[in-house]
Image: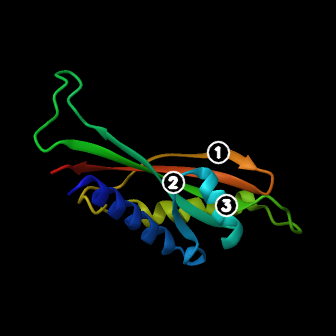
């Protein structure tokens, strides 16, 4: 699979899985940067999410520094969830964010990427927020064979 097509199909696969969460149909975008996602989020309303392509790295044998036959790589994407930073009544959007992150994990874990390998959960954390929103990241990777 060619690199641009591989990356695009994996990104679209994650987006489709995220959109299976009912509140996120038509509220997931592919963004190149966190700033781009924040700009688009203003039009989508909170909560919303984006997929950021982090790139690929070689899975070369670290002892021999050789690349196994088939050029194995690890493709990495970050899901960025944005929730409102405003408080309305007793609503706690941080709790809502944790529930949404769990729904994303449930939608992605134990599924295969278009590369035919499973998506692997790497991390989840709060990230730099803005005054009008809180941001949370989930990083997922999958193995791919470049041909």
Q: Secondary structure at mark 3?
A: helix
Residue 137 shown left or right of residue 117 in the figure = right
> Residue tagged by mark 3?
39
**What is the residue that sits farthest to the top in this orientation?**
63
Say if 125 sits above or below 91 in the image.
Answer: above
Measuring from the top left, give residue 10's x and y in whole percent. 35, 60
The first of marks 3 and 2 along the sequence is 2
Of the two numbered discs 1 and 3 in the rendering, the one whose residue sits closer to the viewer: 3
Label drawn at residue 32: 2
Give me the C-alpha separation between circle 2 and circle 1: 16 Å
Of residues 51 and 136, the one nearer the viewer is 51
Of the two numbered discs 2 and 1 in the rendering, the one whose residue sits closer to the viewer: 2
**What is the residue that sits farthest to the right in this orientation?**
89
Label 1 neighbourhood size at 10 Å, few (<14), some (14-19), many (20+)?
few
Measuring from the top left, give residue 16's x and y in whole percent. 43, 71
Q: Residue at x 22, y 55 (%)?
A: 2
Q: Residue at x 52, y 51 (%)?
A: 138
């Amino acid at each position: 699979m060619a690199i641009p097509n591989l990356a695009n199909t994996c990104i679209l696969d994650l987006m489709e899985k995220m959109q299976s969460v009912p509140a996120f149909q038509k509220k997931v975008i592919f963004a190149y940067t966190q700033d781009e996602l924040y700009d688009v989020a203003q039009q989508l309303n909170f909560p919303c999410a984006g997929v950021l392509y982090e790139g690929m790295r070689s899975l070369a044998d670290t002892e021999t520094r050789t690349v196994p036959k088939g050029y194995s790589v690890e493709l990495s994407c970050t899901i960025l969830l944005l929730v409102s930073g405003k408080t309305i009544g007793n609503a706690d959007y941080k709790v809502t964010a944790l529930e949404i992150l769990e729904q994303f994990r449930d939608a992605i874990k134990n599924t295969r990427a278009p590369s035919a390998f499973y998506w692997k959960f790497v991390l989840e954390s709060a990230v730099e927020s803005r005054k009008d929103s809180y941001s949370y990241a989930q990083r997922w990777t999958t193995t791919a064979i470049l041909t």
